[in-house]
């Protein structure tokens, strides 16, 4: 043991005996001292980027891992272990040994135990089908006829639009891109036909973040340089637009929560010289980490000659605006994965100027991704369609609006092309002068038409007719998500749709999200479900379990 060398030296001094030819303990020999110096230098090199003896500018005084930089949150209390231990002992005092039971909640939380994955949406809910079945059974012998009862959802939330009380149904956005390929196949090629060198690339920075692999052991500066080199190699001096991640709530909060639900997401205090340790996906799941690495990548790209822009919030509008402006000067290729970009390009692109393309560069198996000729598709689908495509995409499901159960985007696209009533409803949503009452009315009309409603139908009567038809033809229980939402639920779906359209039309919308189907809770936006109770009061009392 190293401490023994001190005793050895002390004994030599006490006895006034010393050996000059060699050290008498291995821990004070030349080889050991040389190894200690090397080990000391390794430790210093490791902790230099994030010294435990200095406050980090981003999180002064925080408890953090000096190797990975992971920062503890307020739940970690291991530094108070003595006071927590004394509190446990005081609880034990005077309690018989055989009756005392240690509680998990009393133990200290370490940085490791606080890294467990938690599901923020976890909630105990009654089985919707069972609840609906009970309500339907009681309603048939109650004070109201069945048609009137169906004016209520008869569920804890509208199952045609929601997955849970706080989570909208996830949209299948690529459906719309696939439908457009079928309509305009010749204009969706496997490669850009242009051969000239004067081409401007506009890149979705959020998509780019996930395309470049990270190597464990590389410094964060190496990671940033790899992005700059990858961009120069594949796209030259491109224009790259990144999302902005702010502390204020956003209507895309729900989408962000969904994406990181299964990720271990802790804040990492890092510097450019610190080595990356961990998994890229978990690192990027934390918005603070993502924003800081974006800034480091942006610096590296700017030094390499790329043009980097940072959006305030979601970058889709900024990407499209930059691409459309660039196409006035030269042939422009927009690179990204999100169908939102294709939809916005078809709506905003101008027919004059140079060629404008959209493509995805992520390979999936052996299939090749189509290259969309934006001007060609505009001519193929028609100007009227391109004016209302924002309505089609938002009403049938986007990141901030619900997918309607059983209503696909391809079906809705065909309906919009051929149905004059649906086109008229879409025009109301496309107008900046529309009032809320007009939007709600147009939304009800659109919902009726997509579900195959007839002239004179309301959502209430349509729900009743579809229920009767499905029950008559079904061989098993018909689940409640298979018929339209109530008028109240459809109202808020329409308001959220209109708000998203306005955001896509102009980033600086003057509308307030809380007036358009959203509410704020704990610094995050949540969708308003309905302004109606799940069922009539008398029915709720009858099925209530006391």
Image: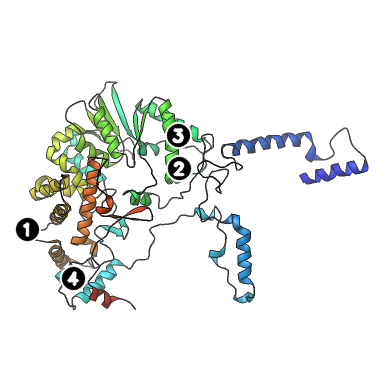
Point out the tag, 3 or 4, that comes first from the N-terminus.
4
Of residues 339 and 58, the one nearer the viewer is: 58
The 10 Å Cα crowd at callout 4, few under 14, some 14 to 19, many 20 or more, is many
What residue would you read off at disc 3?
296
Of residues 521 and 9, the one nearer the viewer is: 521
The disc at residue 149 is 4
The disc at residue 455 is 1
Point out the tag, 1 or 2, that comes first from the N-terminus.
2
Mark 3: which secondary structure?
A: helix
Tell me whether the residue at label 3 lies in contact with that at label 2, contact meaning CB atoms closer than 8 angstroms.
no
How far apart marks 1 and 2 lie (CA) works out to 54 Å
**Farthest residue toward the right?**
16
Tell me whether the residue at label 1 lies in contact with that at label 2, contact meaning CB atoms closer than 8 angstroms.
no
The 10 Å Cα crowd at callout 2, few under 14, some 14 to 19, many 20 or more, is some
Point out the tag, 4 or 2, that comes first from the N-terminus.
4
The disc at residue 486 is none
Mark 1: which secondary structure?
A: loop
Mark 2: which secondary structure?
A: helix
How far apart marks 3 and 2 lie (CA) works out to 11 Å
């Amino acid at each position: 043991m190293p401490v023994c060398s001190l005793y050895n030296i002390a004994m030599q001094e006490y006895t006034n005996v010393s050996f000059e030819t060699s050290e008498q303990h291995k821990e004070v020999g030349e080889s050991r001292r040389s190894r200690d110096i090397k080990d000391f230098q390794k430790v210093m090199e490791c902790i230099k980027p994030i010294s435990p003896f200095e406050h980090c500018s981003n999180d002064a005084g925080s408890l953090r891992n000096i190797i990975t930089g992971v920062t503890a949150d307020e739940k970690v209390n291991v530094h108070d272990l003595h006071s927590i231990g004394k509190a446990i002992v005081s609880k034990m005092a005077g309690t018989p040994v055989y009756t005392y039971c240690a509680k998990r909640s009393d133990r200290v939380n370490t940085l490791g135990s606080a890294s467990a994955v938690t599901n923020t949406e976890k909630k105990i809910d009654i089985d919707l089908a069972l609840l609906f079945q009970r309500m339907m059974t009681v309603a048939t012998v109650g004070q109201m006829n069945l048609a009137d009862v169906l004016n209520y959802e008869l569920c804890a939330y509208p199952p045609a639009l929601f997955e849970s009380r706080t989570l909208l149904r996830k949209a299948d956005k690529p459906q719309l891109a696939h439908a457009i390929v079928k309509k305009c196949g010749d204009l969706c090629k496997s490669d850009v036909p242009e051969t000239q060198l004067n081409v401007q690339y506009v890149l979705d920075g959020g998509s780019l973040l996930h395309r470049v692999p990270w190597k464990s052991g590389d410094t964060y500066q190496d990671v940033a340089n790899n992005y700059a080199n990858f961009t120069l190699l594949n796209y030259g001096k491109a224009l790259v637009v990144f999302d902005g991640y702010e502390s204020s709530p956003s209507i895309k909060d729900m989408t962000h929560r969904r994406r990181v639900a299964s990720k271990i997401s802790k804040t990492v205090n890092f510097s450019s010289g610190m080595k990356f340790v961990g998994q890229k996906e978990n690192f990027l799941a934390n918005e603070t980490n993502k924003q800081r690495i974006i800034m480091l990548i942006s610096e590296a790209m700017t030094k390499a000659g790329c043009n980097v822009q940072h959006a305030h919030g979601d970058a889709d509008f900024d990407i499209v605006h930059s691409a459309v402006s660039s196409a006035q000067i030269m042939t422009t290729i927009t690179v990204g994965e999100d169908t939102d970009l294709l939809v916005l390009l078809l709506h905003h692109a101008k027919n004059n100027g140079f060629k404008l393309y959209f493509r995805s560069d992520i390979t999936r198996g052996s299939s090749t991704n189509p290259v969309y000729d934006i001007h060609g598709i505009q001519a193929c689908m028609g100007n009227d369609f391109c004016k209302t495509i924002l309505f089609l995409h938002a009403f049938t499901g986007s990141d901030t609006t619900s997918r309607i159960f059983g209503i696909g985007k391809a079906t809705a696209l065909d309906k919009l092309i051929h149905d004059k009533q649906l086109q008229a409803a879409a025009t109301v949503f496309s107008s900046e002068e529309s009032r809320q009452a007009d939007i709600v009315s147009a939304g009800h009309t659109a919902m009726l038409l997509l579900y195959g409603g007839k002239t004179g139908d309301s959502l209430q009567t349509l729900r009743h007719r579809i229920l009767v038809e499905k029950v008559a033809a079904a061989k098993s229980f018909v689940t409640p998500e298979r018929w339209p939402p109530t008028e109240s639920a459809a109202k808020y779906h329409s308001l959220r749709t209109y708000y998203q359209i306005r955001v896509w039309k102009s980033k600086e919308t003057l509308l307030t999200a809380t007036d358009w189907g959203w509410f704020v809770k704990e610094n995050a936006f949540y969708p308003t479900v309905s302004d109606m109770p799940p069922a009539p009061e008398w029915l709720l009392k009858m099925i209530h379990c006391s």
